[in-house]
Image (cartoon, rainbow, N blue to C red):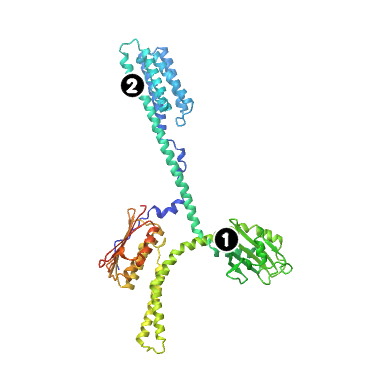
């Protein structure tokens, strides 16, 4: 067999899902809801810096112009006091408390008064209203556009009255009004950006929270799935029940009957110390078990011979009989019997009644789990039956026919004929061994598709005599269940090439990279016309069912005399 291309693995995140999921969640993800939008600290820093800049700049200009003006110093003291107060308090811009608009109005009045009484447009504090106007735009936003206009108009009017004596003030007033308007608009824009960031952050936090909850659920389900085969298997449950009751009660016989949902029959799930039929009708149950079905409490009989009640064990003298209730129905019956009289009494019955609830739940879970497992195994059972029919049953039928012919008294038994039958029997044994090997050759967490295929194709090449070329390029590994279905499709296609195609060469190509898996099985056999063939032939139905199960697309390209190509393609996470 020729191998083309190295096998390189770069496991993707899906391979580490369980490991990553069991780690503690990131503090950033756990506290997403408490993180503030990034615009708020910047706005607070901008407001504080602008206050100190305009205040100190105004004090410097006022000192340079008229250092002895008491009004200018009074205005400077007011602005400094307010700036210090706001620097220490740091208004909570995130929650926008109700007192924020009042604080903005107070700061705006202080700034307007300071600018008006110290020269209007020529005042050193003419830039002081910029900060409260910006905060007003942030505080009121779009909901109070008229209030913003009033605030801007008030500032402009106040400055206009203060500079009415100057004939050239109209142009300066207009420019200053534009600056004030831009400050107000800046505050409104920041508020809009903050609201948008809050909405996006809330949505992201909700999504992360949902992902965390889903991750926790998947981890729990994964851990639960690992325990299902042992904790929910009916045989395991009954064995555990037997050990538990043997430690708690001394009994001669223990009988556990499970009710069949589709009939009135009772199936024997456990018979310890007594021989019991596989199934029993309700009317064939002992009187003690029939009476136990009518009550929610276990029934204890001290001496069966002294009462009209009968048990299951012929020589039983004492017993406890209970019905296990689940989903409002009796799902199982338990009979604990002893050959000695007065072994069990009311105290033992009360003790047993305290555990019947957990026993009933365990038995009911085991029963339903057996139903689910039976449904899941049905498809695989059908495939195995088809394989045995096609590969073994026909050969055995031929052997039977030949042996019948050779056993005829008038038949001439030649060494060649007997040798032919012997060869067929050897062939059947080989077929059985190959079938068992194919069933055991499966993908698992330890054995990936490429590794299983390499070992299988070596054996396949020796068995069939076909030349096999295997090309693989694996950069990501999908789930084990996906690989398993892909491998079964490959097996079916290879068997078709060996048994029907009369091929000489088979090429298998497997690629798992860039978020896409492609599987190709190509032979140079006689081919066929897929649209004209019976759908049940060549295992095409089984291959399509397996492809559908994993959400893959299966294409069959063939033509008489041109071979057959089976192509499977599916999208996976990178």
Q: Which numbered tag is attached to residue 363?
A: 1
Picture coordinates of residue 374, whole percent (x, y):
49, 63
Picture coordinates of residue 1, whole percent (x, y):
30, 68
Residue reaching furthest to the left: 561
The residue tagged 2 is: 178
Which residue occupies 37% across, 53% down?
12
Q: From the viewer's perspective, is residue 24 above or below residue 446?
A: above
User: Which of 173/150 is in front?
Assistant: 150
Residue reaching furthest to the right: 306
Query: Which quadrant holds residue 450?
Result: bottom left
Query: Which quadrant holds residue 353?
Result: bottom right
Q: Is residue 470 visible?
A: no
Which residue occupies 36% across, 24% down?
183
Picture coordinates of residue 483, whole percent (x, y):
38, 60
Q: From the viewer's perspective, is residue 124 above or below residue 196?
A: above
Comparing labels 2 and 1, the label whose residue is closer to the camera: 1
Left or right of residue 530: residue 437? right
Under tag 2, what secondary structure?
Answer: helix
User: Which of 515/314 is in front?
Assistant: 314
User: Which of 380/203 is in front?
Assistant: 380
């Amino acid at each position: 067999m020729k191998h083309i291309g190295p096998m390189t693995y770069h496991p993707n995140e899906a391979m580490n899902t369980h490991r990553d999921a069991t780690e503690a969640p990131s503090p950033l993800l756990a506290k997403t809801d408490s993180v503030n939008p990034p615009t708020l600290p910047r706005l607070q820093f901008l407001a504080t810096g602008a206050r100190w800049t305009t205040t100190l700049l105004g004090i410097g200009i006022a000192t340079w112009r008229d250092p002895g003006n008491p009004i200018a110093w009074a205005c400077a003291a007011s602005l400094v006091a307010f700036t210090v107060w706001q620097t220490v308090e740091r208004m909570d811009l995130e929650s926008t408390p109700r007192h924020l608009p009042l604080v903005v109005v107070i700061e705006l009045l202080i700034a307007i008064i300071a600018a008006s009484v110290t020269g209007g447009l020529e005042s050193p504090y003419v830039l002081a209203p910029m900060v409260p106007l910006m905060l007003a735009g942030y505080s009121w936003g779009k909901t109070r556009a008229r209030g913003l206009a009033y605030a801007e108009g008030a500032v402009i009017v106040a400055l206009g009255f203060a500079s009415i004596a100057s004939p050239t003030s109209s142009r300066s007033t207009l420019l200053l009004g534009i600056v004030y308007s831009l400050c107000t608009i800046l505050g409104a824009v920041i508020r809009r950006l903050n609201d948008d960031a809050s909405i996006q952050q809330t949505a992201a936090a909700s999504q992360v929270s949902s992902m965390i909850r889903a991750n926790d659920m998947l981890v729990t389900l994964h851990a639960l799935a690992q325990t299902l085969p042992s904790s929910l298997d009916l045989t395991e449950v009954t064995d555990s029940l037997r050990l538990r009751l043997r430690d708690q009660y001394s009994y001669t016989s223990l009988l556990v009957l499970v009710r069949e949902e589709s009939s009135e029959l009772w199936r024997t799930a456990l018979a310890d110390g007594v021989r019991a039929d596989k199934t029993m009708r309700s009317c064939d149950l002992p009187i003690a078990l029939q009476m136990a079905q009518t009550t929610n409490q276990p029934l204890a009989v001290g001496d069966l011979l002294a009462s009209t009640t009968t048990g299951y064990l012929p020589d039983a003298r004492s017993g406890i009989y209970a019905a296990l209730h689940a989903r409002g129905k009796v799902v199982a019956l338990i009979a604990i019997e002893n050959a000695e009289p007065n072994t069990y009494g009311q105290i033992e019955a009360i003790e047993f009644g305290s555990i019947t609830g957990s026993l009933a739940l365990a038995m009911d879970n085991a029963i339903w789990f057996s139903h689910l497992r039976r449904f899941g195994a049905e498809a695989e059972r059908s495939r195995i039956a088809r394989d045995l029919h096609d590969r073994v049953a026909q050969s055995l039928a031929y052997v039977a026919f030949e042996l019948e012919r050779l056993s005829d008294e008038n038949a001439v038994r030649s060494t060649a004929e007997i040798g032919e039958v012997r060869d067929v029997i050897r062939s059947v044994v080989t077929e059985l061994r190959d079938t068992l090997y194919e069933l055991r050759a499966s993908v698992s967490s330890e054995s990936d598709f490429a590794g299983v295929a390499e070992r299988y194709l070596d054996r396949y090449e020796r068995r069939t005599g076909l030349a096999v070329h295997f090309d693989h390029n694996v950069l990501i590994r999908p789930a084990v269940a996906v690989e398993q279905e892909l491998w079964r499709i490959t097996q079916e296609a290879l068997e078709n090439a060996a048994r029907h195609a009369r091929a000489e060469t088979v090429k298998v190509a497997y690629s798992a990279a860039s978020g896409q898996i492609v599987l190709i099985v190509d032979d140079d056999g006689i081919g066929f016309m897929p649209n004209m063939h019976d759908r049940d032939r060549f295992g095409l139905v089984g291959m399509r069912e397996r492809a559908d199960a994993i959400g893959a697309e299966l294409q069959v390209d063939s033509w008489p005399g041109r071979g057959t190509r089976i192509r499977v393609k599916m999208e996976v996470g990178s």
